[in-house]
Image (cartoon, rainbow, N blue to C red):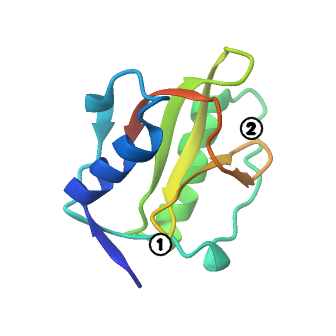
Amino acid sequence: MKRISVSRAKWVLRKHLKSRIFWAHKILLFDGLYELVDESKLDLEQVRLGSGDCDERAFVMMGQVIEEHPKYLFGFVEGYDRRNLKHAWCFMMNESEAVRYAEPSSAEIFNPSIERVYHFIR
């Protein structure tokens, strides 16, 4: 399993997403070392909550993944989606150090495009 330091992870997030991050200092990673996500071992499920909003769904998805893989660099991200509406997703960094997002309501994994992000938490 490939690992990454918190300082390297923040550098990669800023480098790959600098045109989309409003405030790069809002990258809150609290552990010193993370495992990069092996997407072939990641089994995401749709998060279904009766009245839950996107923030709650993203936290639930993050919790499910971290419960199974406690050291994965898989967290919560907030920003504005393609329609310019406030939204929350999960983010991960895979073994190629590529940043990917996961949509909690559909379990779809996708590459960041025009989403404007203002903070990451893990």
Viewer-side label of 1, 2:
1
Badge 1 is on which residue?
Answer: 69
Up the image or down, 31 lies above or below 120; here it is: below
Residue located farthest toward the bottom when viewing the structure as drawn: 1
Q: Secondary structure at mark 1?
A: loop
Q: Which residue is at the front of the view, 70 or 18?
A: 18
What percent of the width, then of the height, locates residue 82? 72, 24
Other residues around mark 1 within 10 Å, as few (<14) / some (14–19) / many (≥20): some
Q: Secondary structure at mark 2?
A: loop
What percent of the width, then of the height, locates residue 20? 49, 29
The reply to whether callout 1 and callout 2 are in contact (CB within 8 Å) is no
Q: Sequence-wise, which precedes: disc 1 or disc 2? A: 2
Amino acid of disc 2: Leu
Residue that appears at 64% across and 30% down: 114
Mark sitting on residue 49 = 2
Q: Is residue 3 left or right of residue 106?
A: left
Q: Is residue 42 left or right of residue 68?
A: right
Q: Which residue is at the front of the view, 121 or 19?
A: 19
Residues at marks 1 and 2, CA–CA distance in whole angstroms: 23 Å
Up the image or down, 90 lies above or below 21; here it is: below
Residue that appears at 70% across and 62% down: 44
Up the image or down, 72 lies above or below 47; here it is: below
What percent of the width, then of the height, locates residue 50? 78, 32
Residue that appears at 30% across and 68% down: 4
